[in-house]
Image (tube, helix red, strand yellow):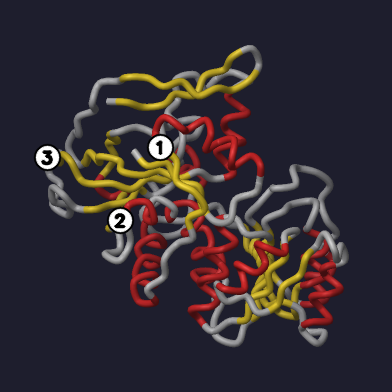
Amino acid sequence: MKAYHLNGHAGAGRLVRVDLGKPEPAGGEVRIRIEAASLNYRDLLIFDRAGQGGLDGRVPLCDGAGIVDAIGHGVTQWQMGDRVAASYFRDWVSGPFKASYIASALGSNNLDGVLAEYVVLPATALVSVPAHLSSVEAATLPCAGVTAWHGLIARGGMGKGDTLLVQGTGGVALFGLQFATALGARAIVISSSDEKLARAKALGASILINYRDTPDWDVALIKATSGAGATHILELGGPGTYDRSLRSVASGGKIIQIGVLTGFGPKPDLARLQWENADIIGVTVGSVAHFAAMDRFLTEHAIHPTVDRIYGFDEVPEAYAHLRTGSHFGKIVIRL
């Protein structure tokens, strides 16, 4: 089968096209013929870390969808030809998070990912693809979709009448926007691009702020909400945005802490959380159960993920390069 490996080269990461033997499922496992995979910001971080050594030969990417192609002994919940997607954490099936689950993240330090024609995983690490979605669309769900669902809905309790602040127009951001729209919540989107803001409006955003034109976007948000602020904030930026998020959160609101898009740096002053009786919810993706619940929601509301661009398997380096530009709107997908 064809696949990609990460390798360090002269102090930098690189992607190497390889030919490997087709894996066979053991007891309790299923083989998936991958039809599509998608990229996340974490894949750039892993790619850059590969240049420091220690990840040579790792198959990258955590997001993939395809067809059940072979079934190991004892598997009864899947049939040949079923359309499935892989969960980000192989071992987090349900229940509370445990630190031990970190090592089971696909395409990470410890496990191969899905950028290959065939992947073998435990039967318990898969979910059915909603019937209304293509494999390209389903491949966008495991990381970005589940992250937004877990943070905003499973733990954040977002619902009708709430106000969501979305930072940017990447994968997690747009899933959050679409979930808010489906639930009847008001969505505020900040971006440096008027074109992207216009597209966000078409997806249901009601308040649009260009932070390049309005650097004090937190002040603009408070004014636009008549002083109330946002009940839910998808905090994707990290040190570069956190202080403004703290100033934007409503009394009793929730900051869903996810991203490090502006890097790693000084920690913000969290005192305002106490004064406003607000919460921070730290989220790293979610479980198989979260994934399945989200899929039911997507089906109920006929939600289609936003796909920015589709690349072929021979164009994987170009897909990575496009992600690094930050110019995408939604998800970048590789079709196998």
**Residue topped by disc 3:** 73
Q: Return the mark for residue 312.
A: 1
Marks 1 and 3, how far apart at CA? 34 Å
Residue labelled with disc 2: 127
Q: Is residue 118 left or right of residue 324?
A: left
> Relative to 228, is 179 above or below?
above
Name the kind of residue labelled 3 in the image.
Answer: His
Q: Position of residue 126 (x, y in %)?
A: 30, 51
Of badges 1 and 2, the one in the foreground is 1
Determine the image quadrant of residue 208. bottom right
**Front in this rendered view, residue 99 or 197:** 197
Give the Cα separation between the discs numbered 3 and 2.
Answer: 19 Å
Please tell me which residue is depicted at 28% across the width and 46% down the height of the picture: 66
Amino acid type, mark 2: Val
Decide: is 292 above or below 249.
above
Q: Is residue 241 left or right of residue 182?
A: right
Asked whether, in this view, residue 219 is left or right of residue 88, the answer is: right
Which residue is situated farthest in the top direction here? 10
